[in-house]
Image: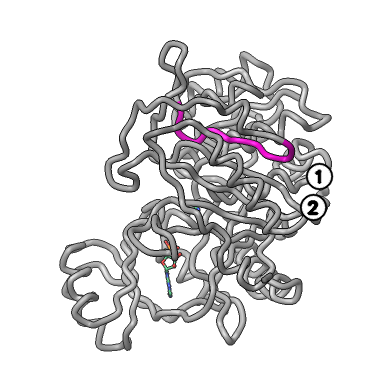
Amino acid sequence: MNILLLGSGGREDALAWRLNQSPSCDRLIAAPGNPGIERWAECHALDPCDPAALVALAKAHAIDLIVVGPEAPLVAGVADAARAAGIATFGPSAAAAMLEGSKGFTKDLCARAGIPTAAYVRVKTAAAALAALDDFSVPVVIKADGLAAGKGVTVAMTRAEAEAAICAAGDGPMVIEAFLEGEEASLFALVDGTRCVVLASAQDHKRVGEGDTGPNTGGMGAYSPAPVLTPALEAQAMREIVEPTARAMAKAGTPFSGILFAGLMLTSDGPSLIEYNVRFGDPECEAIMPRIEGDFADLLHAVATGADFAAPSLSPKHSMTVIVAASGYPGTPRKGGTIAALDTAATDGTIIFHAGTARDGDRLVASGGRVLAVTALGENLRDAATRAYRAVDAIDFADGFHRRDIGWRELERQG
Ligand code: AMP
Ligand code: GLY
Protein backbone atom coordinates (compact mmCIF):
# COMPACT_ATOMS: atom_id res chain seq x y z
CA MET A 1 0.00 0.00 0.00
CA ASN A 2 0.91 3.66 -0.36
CA ILE A 3 1.19 5.56 2.91
CA LEU A 4 1.18 9.27 3.71
CA LEU A 5 2.70 10.20 7.07
CA LEU A 6 1.99 13.62 8.59
CA GLY A 7 4.49 15.45 10.76
CA SER A 8 8.10 16.56 10.95
CA GLY A 9 9.63 15.52 14.28
CA GLY A 10 11.59 12.68 15.84
CA ARG A 11 8.38 10.77 16.44
CA GLU A 12 7.58 10.90 12.73
CA ASP A 13 11.14 9.92 11.74
CA ALA A 14 10.76 6.80 13.91
CA LEU A 15 7.31 6.05 12.46
CA ALA A 16 8.64 6.54 8.92
CA TRP A 17 11.60 4.24 9.62
CA ARG A 18 9.31 1.53 10.95
CA LEU A 19 6.61 1.91 8.28
CA ASN A 20 9.23 1.82 5.52
CA GLN A 21 10.38 -1.60 6.77
CA SER A 22 6.88 -3.05 6.70
CA PRO A 23 6.34 -5.67 3.98
CA SER A 24 2.94 -4.15 3.13
CA CYS A 25 4.36 -0.65 2.55
CA ASP A 26 5.02 -0.11 -1.15
CA ARG A 27 5.55 3.61 -1.07
CA LEU A 28 5.90 6.10 1.78
CA ILE A 29 5.47 9.84 1.44
CA ALA A 30 5.59 12.41 4.21
CA ALA A 31 4.23 15.93 4.71
CA PRO A 32 6.19 17.93 5.49
CA GLY A 33 8.85 15.48 6.77
CA ASN A 34 12.43 16.43 7.69
CA PRO A 35 15.98 15.55 6.57
CA GLY A 36 15.86 12.33 8.64
CA ILE A 37 12.53 11.25 7.21
CA GLU A 38 13.94 11.83 3.70
CA ARG A 39 15.96 8.64 4.29
CA TRP A 40 12.76 6.56 4.25
CA ALA A 41 10.13 8.66 2.50
CA GLU A 42 9.53 11.18 -0.24
CA CYS A 43 8.85 14.49 1.51
CA HIS A 44 6.33 17.11 0.39
CA ALA A 45 6.41 20.62 1.84
CA LEU A 46 2.80 20.89 2.95
CA ASP A 47 1.03 22.11 6.06
CA PRO A 48 -0.10 18.97 7.94
CA CYS A 49 -3.03 20.96 9.36
CA ASP A 50 -4.51 21.82 5.94
CA PRO A 51 -7.14 19.12 5.27
CA ALA A 52 -7.91 20.13 1.67
CA ALA A 53 -4.26 20.18 0.60
CA LEU A 54 -3.61 16.82 2.26
CA VAL A 55 -6.59 15.12 0.68
CA ALA A 56 -5.44 16.44 -2.71
CA LEU A 57 -1.91 15.13 -2.11
CA ALA A 58 -3.28 11.76 -0.97
CA LYS A 59 -5.48 11.45 -4.06
CA ALA A 60 -2.65 12.44 -6.39
CA HIS A 61 -0.47 9.66 -4.95
CA ALA A 62 -3.15 6.96 -4.62
CA ILE A 63 -2.66 6.85 -0.87
CA ASP A 64 -4.22 3.86 0.93
CA LEU A 65 -3.42 4.96 4.47
CA ILE A 66 -2.73 8.27 6.19
CA VAL A 67 -0.84 8.08 9.49
CA VAL A 68 -1.11 11.23 11.59
CA GLY A 69 1.88 11.90 13.88
CA PRO A 70 1.18 15.08 15.91
CA GLU A 71 -1.98 16.17 17.75
CA ALA A 72 -2.52 19.50 15.98
CA PRO A 73 -3.79 18.01 12.69
CA LEU A 74 -6.08 15.68 14.65
CA VAL A 75 -7.60 18.53 16.62
CA ALA A 76 -7.90 20.46 13.32
CA GLY A 77 -10.05 17.63 11.91
CA VAL A 78 -7.60 16.25 9.36
CA ALA A 79 -8.61 12.65 10.12
CA ASP A 80 -12.28 13.53 9.64
CA ALA A 81 -11.60 15.20 6.28
CA ALA A 82 -9.46 12.29 5.06
CA ARG A 83 -12.05 9.70 6.08
CA ALA A 84 -14.81 11.75 4.47
CA ALA A 85 -12.75 11.61 1.27
CA GLY A 86 -12.64 7.82 1.57
CA ILE A 87 -9.02 7.51 2.71
CA ALA A 88 -8.23 5.15 5.59
CA THR A 89 -6.65 7.19 8.37
CA PHE A 90 -4.80 6.18 11.50
CA GLY A 91 -5.71 8.79 14.10
CA PRO A 92 -8.87 9.90 15.90
CA SER A 93 -11.59 12.30 14.78
CA ALA A 94 -11.50 15.87 16.08
CA ALA A 95 -14.31 14.92 18.49
CA ALA A 96 -12.31 11.97 19.90
CA ALA A 97 -9.12 14.07 19.99
CA MET A 98 -10.85 16.03 22.78
CA LEU A 99 -9.35 13.42 25.10
CA GLU A 100 -6.11 15.36 24.62
CA GLY A 101 -7.54 18.72 23.59
CA SER A 102 -9.45 19.32 26.81
CA LYS A 103 -8.38 18.16 30.25
CA GLY A 104 -11.82 19.06 31.62
CA PHE A 105 -13.52 16.86 29.00
CA THR A 106 -11.36 13.90 30.00
CA LYS A 107 -11.85 14.46 33.73
CA ASP A 108 -15.65 14.58 33.28
CA LEU A 109 -15.52 11.38 31.23
CA CYS A 110 -13.48 9.68 33.97
CA ALA A 111 -15.98 10.81 36.60
CA ARG A 112 -18.90 9.44 34.56
CA ALA A 113 -17.21 6.13 33.83
CA GLY A 114 -15.67 5.59 37.29
CA ILE A 115 -12.12 5.72 35.92
CA PRO A 116 -9.42 6.26 38.57
CA THR A 117 -8.01 9.80 38.32
CA ALA A 118 -7.21 12.62 40.76
CA ALA A 119 -10.20 14.39 42.39
CA TYR A 120 -10.82 17.71 40.57
CA VAL A 121 -12.95 20.73 39.94
CA ARG A 122 -13.36 22.69 36.70
CA VAL A 123 -13.48 26.47 36.93
CA LYS A 124 -13.69 29.32 34.41
CA THR A 125 -12.29 32.28 36.32
CA ALA A 126 -9.31 32.98 38.53
CA ALA A 127 -11.67 33.97 41.36
CA ALA A 128 -13.45 30.61 41.18
CA ALA A 129 -10.10 28.83 41.07
CA LEU A 130 -8.87 30.67 44.18
CA ALA A 131 -12.10 29.78 46.00
CA ALA A 132 -11.80 26.14 44.91
CA LEU A 133 -8.38 25.86 46.58
CA ASP A 134 -10.19 25.62 49.94
CA ASP A 135 -11.31 22.12 48.96
CA PHE A 136 -7.77 20.85 48.35
CA SER A 137 -4.73 20.24 50.50
CA VAL A 138 -1.24 20.89 49.15
CA PRO A 139 0.48 19.89 46.98
CA VAL A 140 -2.26 20.79 44.49
CA VAL A 141 -2.17 20.79 40.70
CA ILE A 142 -3.38 23.69 38.52
CA LYS A 143 -3.94 22.99 34.82
CA ALA A 144 -4.92 25.37 32.06
CA ASP A 145 -7.55 23.63 29.92
CA GLY A 146 -6.70 23.31 26.25
CA LEU A 147 -3.95 21.96 24.03
CA ALA A 148 -0.89 22.91 26.06
CA ALA A 149 1.73 20.46 24.79
CA GLY A 150 2.66 19.54 28.35
CA LYS A 151 2.86 23.16 29.45
CA GLY A 152 0.29 25.05 31.47
CA VAL A 153 0.52 22.63 34.40
CA THR A 154 1.71 23.77 37.82
CA VAL A 155 2.31 21.36 40.65
CA ALA A 156 2.08 23.80 43.57
CA MET A 157 3.77 22.72 46.77
CA THR A 158 2.22 25.51 48.83
CA ARG A 159 -1.03 27.45 48.85
CA ALA A 160 0.89 30.62 47.96
CA GLU A 161 2.40 28.91 44.91
CA ALA A 162 -1.05 27.73 43.84
CA GLU A 163 -2.48 31.24 44.20
CA ALA A 164 0.43 32.68 42.21
CA ALA A 165 -0.10 30.16 39.40
CA ILE A 166 -3.80 30.97 39.23
CA CYS A 167 -3.17 34.72 39.21
CA ALA A 168 -0.51 34.34 36.52
CA ALA A 169 -2.90 32.28 34.38
CA GLY A 170 -5.76 34.78 34.79
CA ASP A 171 -9.34 34.02 33.78
CA GLY A 172 -9.99 31.05 31.54
CA PRO A 173 -10.95 27.39 31.82
CA MET A 174 -8.85 25.57 34.39
CA VAL A 175 -8.80 22.25 36.20
CA ILE A 176 -7.70 22.14 39.82
CA GLU A 177 -6.84 18.66 40.96
CA ALA A 178 -5.47 16.67 43.86
CA PHE A 179 -1.81 15.70 43.80
CA LEU A 180 -1.15 12.04 43.07
CA GLU A 181 1.81 10.39 44.70
CA GLY A 182 3.78 7.73 42.84
CA GLU A 183 5.91 7.02 39.80
CA GLU A 184 4.73 7.97 36.32
CA ALA A 185 4.60 5.53 33.41
CA SER A 186 3.10 5.68 29.94
CA LEU A 187 0.90 3.05 28.39
CA PHE A 188 0.30 3.03 24.63
CA ALA A 189 -2.82 1.21 23.45
CA LEU A 190 -4.17 0.65 19.96
CA VAL A 191 -7.88 1.40 20.08
CA ASP A 192 -10.64 1.11 17.51
CA GLY A 193 -14.07 1.70 18.99
CA THR A 194 -14.30 -0.67 21.95
CA ARG A 195 -11.39 -2.90 20.90
CA CYS A 196 -8.18 -2.12 22.78
CA VAL A 197 -4.79 -3.82 22.77
CA VAL A 198 -1.53 -2.87 24.43
CA LEU A 199 1.20 -1.66 22.08
CA ALA A 200 3.97 -0.97 24.60
CA SER A 201 4.93 0.82 27.79
CA ALA A 202 7.54 3.53 28.25
CA GLN A 203 8.82 6.15 30.67
CA ASP A 204 10.16 9.56 29.75
CA HIS A 205 12.07 12.38 31.44
CA LYS A 206 10.23 15.68 31.09
CA ARG A 207 12.57 17.98 33.01
CA VAL A 208 15.49 19.55 31.22
CA GLY A 209 18.07 18.88 33.93
CA GLU A 210 19.76 15.81 35.34
CA GLY A 211 18.06 14.29 38.35
CA ASP A 212 14.75 15.42 36.82
CA THR A 213 15.23 19.08 37.74
CA GLY A 214 14.57 22.39 36.00
CA PRO A 215 11.82 23.42 33.59
CA ASN A 216 9.55 21.00 31.77
CA THR A 217 10.33 20.08 28.18
CA GLY A 218 8.63 17.89 25.58
CA GLY A 219 10.86 15.10 26.88
CA MET A 220 14.64 14.72 27.14
CA GLY A 221 14.75 10.96 26.78
CA ALA A 222 12.69 7.81 27.14
CA TYR A 223 12.96 4.08 27.43
CA SER A 224 10.79 1.09 26.69
CA PRO A 225 9.60 -1.12 28.25
CA ALA A 226 8.79 0.45 31.63
CA PRO A 227 9.23 -2.55 33.94
CA VAL A 228 7.63 -0.56 36.78
CA LEU A 229 4.37 -1.08 34.88
CA THR A 230 4.28 -4.81 35.60
CA PRO A 231 2.07 -7.13 33.54
CA ALA A 232 -0.48 -7.10 36.40
CA LEU A 233 -0.53 -3.27 36.60
CA GLU A 234 -0.71 -3.01 32.82
CA ALA A 235 -3.72 -5.35 32.75
CA GLN A 236 -5.33 -3.33 35.55
CA ALA A 237 -4.76 -0.06 33.66
CA MET A 238 -6.32 -1.54 30.51
CA ARG A 239 -9.32 -2.87 32.47
CA GLU A 240 -9.93 0.15 34.71
CA ILE A 241 -8.78 3.04 32.51
CA VAL A 242 -8.30 2.42 28.77
CA GLU A 243 -11.20 0.02 28.09
CA PRO A 244 -13.84 2.03 29.99
CA THR A 245 -12.61 5.16 28.20
CA ALA A 246 -13.08 3.50 24.82
CA ARG A 247 -16.57 2.34 25.84
CA ALA A 248 -17.53 5.80 27.10
CA MET A 249 -16.31 7.44 23.87
CA ALA A 250 -18.23 4.94 21.75
CA LYS A 251 -21.36 5.41 23.88
CA ALA A 252 -21.11 9.18 23.42
CA GLY A 253 -21.13 8.68 19.65
CA THR A 254 -17.49 9.75 19.30
CA PRO A 255 -15.61 6.45 19.12
CA PHE A 256 -11.84 6.66 19.37
CA SER A 257 -9.61 5.15 16.69
CA GLY A 258 -5.83 5.33 16.74
CA ILE A 259 -3.22 5.25 19.47
CA LEU A 260 -4.28 6.21 22.96
CA PHE A 261 -1.36 7.30 25.14
CA ALA A 262 -2.30 7.07 28.81
CA GLY A 263 -0.07 9.01 31.21
CA LEU A 264 -0.42 7.05 34.44
CA MET A 265 0.54 7.62 38.04
CA LEU A 266 1.28 4.33 39.74
CA THR A 267 -0.16 5.09 43.17
CA SER A 268 -0.38 2.79 46.17
CA ASP A 269 -4.03 2.26 45.16
CA GLY A 270 -3.11 1.23 41.62
CA PRO A 271 -2.77 3.10 38.31
CA SER A 272 -4.49 6.48 38.13
CA LEU A 273 -4.92 8.51 34.93
CA ILE A 274 -2.96 11.79 34.78
CA GLU A 275 -3.77 12.62 31.19
CA TYR A 276 -4.43 11.25 27.75
CA ASN A 277 -2.68 12.04 24.52
CA VAL A 278 -4.24 10.90 21.25
CA ARG A 279 -0.97 10.30 19.41
CA PHE A 280 2.36 8.63 19.98
CA GLY A 281 4.60 10.24 22.59
CA ASP A 282 7.75 12.02 21.54
CA PRO A 283 10.41 10.70 22.42
CA GLU A 284 8.55 7.57 23.62
CA CYS A 285 7.75 6.66 20.00
CA GLU A 286 11.44 6.68 19.07
CA ALA A 287 12.11 4.22 21.91
CA ILE A 288 9.13 1.99 21.08
CA MET A 289 9.46 1.63 17.29
CA PRO A 290 12.66 -0.47 17.32
CA ARG A 291 10.92 -3.01 19.60
CA ILE A 292 7.95 -3.61 17.31
CA GLU A 293 8.09 -6.75 15.21
CA GLY A 294 5.93 -7.74 12.28
CA ASP A 295 4.13 -5.66 9.68
CA PHE A 296 3.51 -2.35 11.47
CA ALA A 297 1.91 -0.67 8.43
CA ASP A 298 -0.58 -3.52 8.15
CA LEU A 299 -1.39 -3.20 11.86
CA LEU A 300 -2.11 0.53 11.59
CA HIS A 301 -4.18 -0.09 8.46
CA ALA A 302 -6.26 -2.69 10.33
CA VAL A 303 -6.91 -0.26 13.21
CA ALA A 304 -7.81 2.48 10.72
CA THR A 305 -10.25 0.35 8.74
CA GLY A 306 -12.05 -1.54 11.51
CA ALA A 307 -10.45 -4.85 10.53
CA ASP A 308 -9.36 -7.38 13.14
CA PHE A 309 -6.07 -6.58 14.81
CA ALA A 310 -3.98 -8.14 17.54
CA ALA A 311 -1.20 -6.81 19.74
CA PRO A 312 2.09 -6.89 17.82
CA SER A 313 4.90 -9.02 19.11
CA LEU A 314 7.54 -6.94 20.81
CA SER A 315 11.24 -7.55 21.01
CA PRO A 316 12.20 -8.54 24.56
CA LYS A 317 15.12 -6.13 24.21
CA HIS A 318 15.19 -2.78 25.99
CA SER A 319 15.36 0.46 24.10
CA MET A 320 16.59 3.89 25.11
CA THR A 321 16.29 7.27 23.40
CA VAL A 322 18.49 10.19 24.43
CA ILE A 323 17.47 13.60 23.13
CA VAL A 324 20.19 15.96 21.95
CA ALA A 325 18.72 19.46 22.20
CA ALA A 326 19.94 22.86 21.01
CA SER A 327 21.43 25.03 23.75
CA GLY A 328 18.79 27.31 25.19
CA TYR A 329 16.02 24.69 25.02
CA PRO A 330 13.32 24.75 26.39
CA GLY A 331 13.60 28.57 26.40
CA THR A 332 14.91 29.96 23.13
CA PRO A 333 16.94 27.26 21.41
CA ARG A 334 19.89 28.37 19.32
CA LYS A 335 19.14 27.47 15.71
CA GLY A 336 21.56 26.94 12.86
CA GLY A 337 24.29 25.01 14.67
CA THR A 338 26.11 22.52 12.43
CA ILE A 339 25.57 18.81 13.07
CA ALA A 340 28.09 16.31 11.70
CA ALA A 341 29.37 12.75 12.04
CA LEU A 342 25.91 11.18 12.29
CA ASP A 343 26.78 8.38 9.88
CA THR A 344 29.77 7.24 11.88
CA ALA A 345 28.06 7.74 15.25
CA ALA A 346 25.22 5.30 14.57
CA THR A 347 26.65 1.80 14.86
CA ASP A 348 25.18 -1.64 15.60
CA GLY A 349 21.62 -1.47 16.92
CA THR A 350 21.73 2.32 17.17
CA ILE A 351 19.71 4.75 15.12
CA ILE A 352 19.68 8.53 15.13
CA PHE A 353 16.26 9.98 14.46
CA HIS A 354 15.97 13.62 13.40
CA ALA A 355 13.72 15.74 15.60
CA GLY A 356 14.62 19.31 14.62
CA THR A 357 17.09 19.42 11.74
CA ALA A 358 17.21 21.23 8.42
CA ARG A 359 19.53 21.41 5.45
CA ASP A 360 21.53 24.53 4.80
CA GLY A 361 23.36 23.87 1.56
CA ASP A 362 25.58 20.88 2.28
CA ARG A 363 25.29 21.29 6.02
CA LEU A 364 22.84 19.66 8.38
CA VAL A 365 21.81 22.24 10.99
CA ALA A 366 19.65 22.47 14.09
CA SER A 367 16.22 23.93 13.39
CA GLY A 368 14.33 23.26 16.62
CA GLY A 369 14.62 22.72 20.35
CA ARG A 370 14.94 18.98 20.32
CA VAL A 371 17.34 18.20 17.50
CA LEU A 372 18.23 14.49 17.52
CA ALA A 373 16.71 11.42 19.17
CA VAL A 374 19.55 8.94 19.58
CA THR A 375 18.09 5.47 20.07
CA ALA A 376 19.65 2.10 20.86
CA LEU A 377 18.39 -1.40 21.57
CA GLY A 378 20.19 -3.57 24.12
CA GLU A 379 19.87 -6.86 25.95
CA ASN A 380 18.94 -4.83 29.03
CA LEU A 381 18.50 -1.14 29.79
CA ARG A 382 22.14 -0.70 30.84
CA ASP A 383 23.30 -2.15 27.54
CA ALA A 384 20.89 0.10 25.61
CA ALA A 385 22.15 3.13 27.56
CA THR A 386 25.80 2.28 26.87
CA ARG A 387 25.12 2.03 23.15
CA ALA A 388 22.96 5.16 23.01
CA TYR A 389 25.51 7.30 24.88
CA ARG A 390 28.37 5.93 22.75
CA ALA A 391 26.53 7.32 19.71
CA VAL A 392 25.67 10.60 21.46
CA ASP A 393 29.36 11.07 22.28
CA ALA A 394 30.39 10.47 18.69
CA ILE A 395 28.09 13.16 17.29
CA ASP A 396 29.67 16.45 16.34
CA PHE A 397 27.20 19.16 17.42
CA ALA A 398 28.90 21.93 19.37
CA ASP A 399 25.63 23.77 20.07
CA GLY A 400 23.91 20.74 21.55
CA PHE A 401 23.39 19.38 25.03
CA HIS A 402 21.81 16.28 26.51
CA ARG A 403 21.11 14.62 29.84
CA ARG A 404 23.54 11.91 30.92
CA ASP A 405 21.10 10.15 33.25
CA ILE A 406 18.22 8.96 31.07
CA GLY A 407 16.72 5.86 32.66
CA TRP A 408 18.28 6.50 36.09
CA ARG A 409 15.36 5.24 38.16
CA GLU A 410 15.13 1.97 36.27
CA LEU A 411 18.92 1.57 36.04
CA GLU A 412 19.12 1.98 39.83
CA ARG A 413 16.45 -0.66 40.31
CA GLN A 414 18.17 -3.04 37.92
CA GLY A 415 21.49 -2.49 39.73
P1 AMP B 1 -0.14 16.73 32.25
O1 AMP B 1 0.07 17.76 31.18
O2 AMP B 1 -1.54 16.64 32.73
O3 AMP B 1 0.44 15.39 31.87
O4 AMP B 1 0.78 17.18 33.46
C1 AMP B 1 2.17 17.37 33.28
C2 AMP B 1 2.91 16.75 34.42
O5 AMP B 1 2.47 17.30 35.66
C3 AMP B 1 2.68 15.25 34.57
O6 AMP B 1 3.53 14.50 33.75
C4 AMP B 1 2.99 15.05 36.04
O7 AMP B 1 4.37 14.99 36.26
C5 AMP B 1 2.48 16.30 36.67
N1 AMP B 1 1.09 16.10 37.14
C6 AMP B 1 -0.03 16.36 36.47
N2 AMP B 1 -1.11 16.06 37.21
C7 AMP B 1 -0.67 15.57 38.37
C8 AMP B 1 -1.31 15.10 39.58
N3 AMP B 1 -2.63 15.10 39.71
N4 AMP B 1 -0.52 14.71 40.58
C9 AMP B 1 0.83 14.74 40.49
N5 AMP B 1 1.48 15.18 39.40
C10 AMP B 1 0.75 15.61 38.36
N1 GLY C 1 6.85 12.95 25.82
C1 GLY C 1 5.55 13.35 26.18
C2 GLY C 1 4.64 13.62 25.07
O1 GLY C 1 4.87 13.28 23.93
O2 GLY C 1 3.59 14.21 25.32
Question: How is the model colour-coded?
Answer: one colour
Name the residue rendered at 30%, 79% in the picture: 157
Q: Which residue is mark 1?
A: 293
The image shows residue 333, relative to residue 53, as above or below, that is below
For image coordinates 45% across by 47% down, the residue present is: 402
Q: Position of residue 172 (x, y in %)?
A: 23, 61
In the rendered image, residue 303 lying in the magenta stretch gets the answer no
Q: Is residue 396 toward the left or the right of residue 132 in the image?
A: right
SS at mark 1 in the image: loop
In the shown orientation, is residue 338 left or right of residue 349? left
Start-end of magenta stretch: 348-357
**Which amino acid, mark 2?**
Leu
Question: Residue 323 appears at what percent x and percent y?
Answer: 50, 45
Residue 128, labelled with which disc? none
Which quadrant of the view contains residue 381?
bottom right
Residue at (67% x, 71% y) in the render: 415
Q: Can residue 353 be found in the magenta stretch? A: yes
Q: Residue furthest top?
A: 361
- The CA distance from mark 1 to mark 2 is 6 Å
Percent of width and height locating residue 115? 57, 76
Amino acid under label 1? Glu
State if disc 2 and disc 1 touch (CB < 8 Å). Answer: yes
Say which residue appears at 35% left-offset and 77% top-offset.
Answer: 121
> Label 2's element?
loop
| Residue occupied by mark 2 | 314
**Badge 1 density bin: few <14, some 14–19, many ≥20, Cα 10 Å:** few
Q: For residue 136, what is the image quadrant?
A: bottom left
